[in-house]
Amino acid sequence: MKPQQYDFKQAAYQRIPHKDFQNVFDFPDFTEMRPVIRAAVHQVAAAAFTQPVLPVQVERMALEIEEQMERETRKYAHQNGVYSNQRAELGNLIRLYTNVLQAISRRDVIDQEIEDIIYAVDQTRQSLGKLSTLTGTGKLYASNHDQELIPDTFYYLVATELMRPYIIDSDKPLTPTNVTHAGKQLMVKLTTYAFRDWDSYLTHQYDEQHNIKNQRGLTTDQYYDLLEKCELKYADHAYADILADLYRATESLLVPTYLPRLDIMATNLTTIFNQHPLLRLKFGQLVRQFFLVDQQGYEHVMDAPLKDIRQKYQYYRQNFE
């Protein structure tokens, strides 16, 4: 047993007020449990592919599975029941917990810490299985990648501006068949950013950094390599600031002279721009300004952040050993 090891089971009993639904994501020491659970989720994600894929695809799938587990679990804990239209979804969630438990149980070493984590995860699985039936209809889970940008709204028009270099036929509308492969990838990325929970995203980064800083036996180079890789992985949170700043600038442009308020997901901006063509030009200028668009129409938001991260860790390696 590791020194100063957490007893998750005891923590669960002693520090969580008793309630019928036990949510592993709310356990006091979940931060310490997360690396083991995350590793198990990663195995489940890898097993979902029937053919060899790139590691980044497995990583993306694992992130989606973990997000789905937490969001669905919190939903059912809040409901304290299940609606009839959610039965299939709940069954899939319970099977997902079972798969995660099986992955944890296949670890080479099952010590007291792992047994306590298995207990905590299984408590949540059992709580999900005991939910009573509710009357009516409930919401079903929809991942960010199932979402689509609503035409004529803020995010859609931002994407339209940034997609210009990738459009195959400029006389035709923006559709998946009228953009290059790189354009499709950019559209997926922009759609993801539009619906992403950035606070949760940064929490994942902080957790990974916390785990790296607590790893033992790393050389200085290994330590900096892992931290650099983590920062590069989450560096695209720069888009959160860009989009927020662009929204505020657009709001200042339109409210209250042309609109009483600007709903980022719902306001039809095309109607306003058709009535006032100069506003469309100003909006396009704002997009190009904030996204650092070059003469060819390509955005460069990530150039500086990625360069800064690499230079920072190169400096650390050279000066701190």
Image: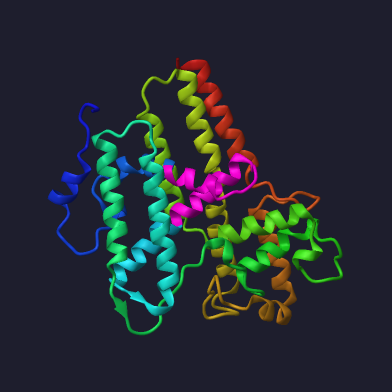
Q: Is residue 71 visible?
A: no
In which quadrant of the rendered view does residue 183 lie? bottom right
Residue 127 against residue 101 in the figure, above or below: below
Specify how the rendered protein is coloured.
rainbow
Count of residue discs: 0
Q: Nearer the viewer, residue 115 or 315?
A: 115
Q: Residue at x 20, y 30 (%)?
A: 4
Q: Is residue 266 left or right of residue 295?
A: left
Q: Is residue 66 left or right of residue 21?
A: right
Coordinates of residue 143 in the picture (x, y in percent): 52, 63
Q: Residue furthest bottom?
A: 136
Magenta span includes 58: yes
Q: Is residue 69 left or right of residue 111?
A: right
Residue 235 against residue 280 in the figure, above or below: above
Which segment did they paint magenta?
A: 40-67
Q: Residue furthest left?
A: 14
Q: Residue at x 77, y 54 (%)?
A: 181
Magenta-drawn stretch, dominant element (helix, strand or loop): helix
Q: Residue at x 54, y 74 (%)?
A: 262
Coordinates of residue 319 in the picture (x, y in percent): 49, 16
Coordinates of residue 136 in the picture (x, y in percent): 37, 84
Residue 263 against residue 204 in the figure, above or below: below
Q: Nearer the viewer, residue 48 or 319?
A: 48
Q: Is residue 9 visible?
A: yes
Q: Is residue 218 left or right of residue 164?
A: left
Q: Quadrant of the C terminus?
A: top left
Q: Quadrant of the N terminus?
A: top left
Magenta span includes 32: no
Coordinates of residue 200 in the picture (x, y in percent): 42, 53
